[in-house]
Amino acid sequence: MTAPRVAAHSMSDAARACERCGDLLDPKTKVYLELNCYTGIYTDPDKVTVPGNESQGLFWFGRACAKRVLASGGCNIRTPKGGAR
């Protein structure tokens, strides 16, 4: 039996920001991607199962940013606004 996945953050929906660009997200259109802490790669948890001991958790992205991250092979190549470059 697979354990349920838990989001990596615990703040309210209203305060969520995209992991890639830092923009505030609409809770109705957000996308979860799962981070593999061994490879540093984000994956779609509905398509790829990351073993529990390798999962860093689920992170929120906007739809466009999630598509870009997955298209880049799962690398989150941009940091949130105000973050280190």
Image (tube, rainbow, N blue to C red):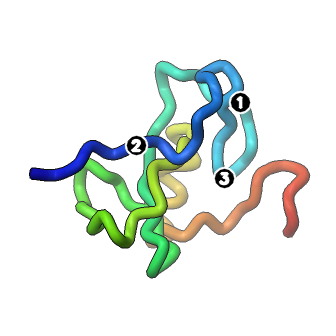
Q: Is residue 14 left or right of residue 74?
A: right
Q: How far across and down, in percent of the image, does residue 34 sit?
A: 42, 56
Q: Amino acid at mark 3?
A: Arg
Residue on which disc 3 sits: 20
Task: Label 1: state its secondary structure.
Answer: loop
Residue density around tag 1, few if under 14, some if 14–19, many if 20 or more, within 10 Å:
some
User: Which residue is disc 1 drawn over?
Assistant: 24
Q: Residue at point 47% right, 42% down?
A: 7
Could you tell me which residue is drawn at 9 percent across and 51 percent down?
Answer: 1
Q: Is residue 33 left or right of residue 45?
A: right
Three-letter amino acid code of the residue under disc 2: Val
Above or below 8: residue 54: below
Crowding at dot 2, Cα within 10 Å, few <14 / some 14-19 / many 20+, comes out as few
Q: Quadrant of the C terminus?
A: bottom right
What residue sits 58% from the left and 41% below the top? Answer: 9
- The picture places residue 48, in percent across and down from the top left corner, at 25, 61
Q: Is residue 81 left or right of residue 63?
A: right
Residue under circle 2?
A: 6
Which residue is more in the foreground, 41 or 36?
Answer: 36
